[in-house]
Amino acid sequence: MAINSIDVGVFVIYCVFLLVLAWWVSREKSGHTKNSSDYFLAGNALPWWAIGSSLVAANISAEQIIGMSGSGYAIGLAIASYEWMAAITLMVIGKWFLPILLEKKIYTMPQFLEQRFDKRVQLVMAFFWLAVYTFVNLTAVLYLGALAIKTIVGVDMLYGMLFLAVFSMAYSLYGGLKAVALTDIVQVTLLVLGGLLVSYLALVEVSGGAGFIAGFQVLLDKTPESFDLILSPDHEDYISLPGISVLIGGMWIMNLSYWGFNQYITQRTLAAKSLREAQKGVAFAAFLKLLMPVLVVLPGIAALVLAPDLERPDMAYPEMMKLVPTGLMGLAFAALVAAIASSLSSMANSVSTIFTMDIYRQLHGGVNSEKKLVMIGRVAAVTAMLVAMIIAEPLLGKMDQAFQYIQEFTGFFTPGVVAIFILGFFVKRANANSALLAAVSSVVLSILARWLWPELPFMDRVGLIFIVCMALGLAACSKKNSDKAIDLQQVDFSTSGGFKIAAACIVLILIALYATWW
């Protein structure tokens, strides 16, 4: 399906507007040269609304919109647990983790590990995150984004990836995190509006024109199994979403790692004006996460009724976008590209931050000139994007559900990541050896479990291996407190009344959702 000239015009106007906005917010005051704090942490000046919208914009991309909609097509509403459980995870992070990270005034997560443990732990985890961002995240977003563009407008995959890479770099490479975060406000607005439009039109189509409420009822009647939030052990996709584990098991470990210790996510909160501003930002993001399944999962379930014979599940969302009329198609297409470009720019910025601050600066004798650090960061971002473009097709071309693949692959490392930070935050006797043991054990044990116990759902595997990593890390702790241990008495864990109310509301909403579709 090719979009017409009106849709192309709407899309081009959006692209030009975003580039102009990015340039405008990135401009420097007379006499001021952009330094590393400006480029990597937006000068520690982000307000709550920019933090919250940027958190969601960085998160919701091709692997969520295309991949999660595809999983909605193949599995059903159960895949929404990743979104809904993330909401309560964000509140936990805002209460217990952000106060420690912001008190340390860090640029990156590996930098925290160097402060708490030593340079060995910092470098090991820096290389790990660079590999994951480049070979998993950037690659998946580029590939799935290009797949969506090909399905909607017929552009060749290579040209689609090239456009996404150049566009995301064009508005983020000069301005750094500030340009990314402040343009994300526009991106999220467009994402929500475009997603609601696609969901609305899909439901109306399902109802035969009787309205979106009637369409939702049709989905409930025709695909009741798609609305099981907790899958039973005899479900064919139980291995992907193993029942109660989405509430009290490995899902927590996956979410804590992603929302608490993932550089391209936490970088927004590290750039906050203050702790209170960061906490308001994560609360805002948590409420947006509650809305996301309406935008990305419902279209996939609707596609199961409207297009039951798709070649692959990941084509569900692009197929539903074909329902959007002329003019609005340009808006919906812009919303999709907005989400993809936002995540690409966020990941590339985090790659540049980690490479520059944790690897280049460490291996080249500490502090370099601010101008050179910014330049090195830009080169690192472009290099990572090029590598991702080259390997995308060979790596993901034969995948059926890319979202589930990404989750399982990162699940090899997630238990160790969470164990390291929990030990570093709350165990005074934890040392570098205990952290490294937890990290190495996570990978080794995950590979062994995947080989020797293949029928074990990966989410259960993540939960079990986290427990083992924690036990091994605790066993390797020193007999006395580390000199680098965090003095929790000096950390402000208090929260505002508004934060407490927001947390209570999110818990009640989640109870209602799971009670309805248990």
Image (tube, rainbow, N blue to C red):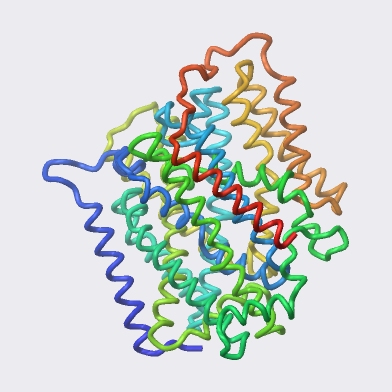
Left/right placement of residue 342 relative to residue 507 reads left
Q: From what the image shows, is residue 115 above or below residue 327?
A: above
Name the residue at the left extreme. Answer: 30
Name the residue at the top extreme. Answer: 480
**Rendered location of residue 204, percent (x, y):** 56, 84
Among the 4 quarters of the image, the one containing residue 76: bottom right
Left/right placement of residue 263 relative to residue 253 reads left
For the C terminus, the image quarter is bottom right
Residue at (72%, 60%) from the top-left corner? 229
- Of 429 and 166, which appears nearest the observer? 429
Residue at (20%, 52%) from the top-left corner? 27
**Rendered location of residue 488, percent (x, y):** 52, 20
Q: From what the image shows, is residue 2 above or below residue 342?
A: below
Q: From what the image shows, is residue 63 above or below residue 479?
A: below
Residue at (33%, 61%) from the top-left corner? 170
Residue at (36%, 35%) from the top-left corner? 274
- Of 132 and 192, which appears nearest the observer? 192
Q: From what the image shows, is residue 27 above or below residue 291?
A: above
Viewer can see residue 355? no
Viewer can see residue 288? yes
**Rendered location of residue 210, percent (x, y):** 58, 88
How many marks do you count on the picture? Answer: 0
Left/right placement of residue 415 relative to residue 116 reads right
**Rendered location of residue 323, percent (x, y):** 52, 86
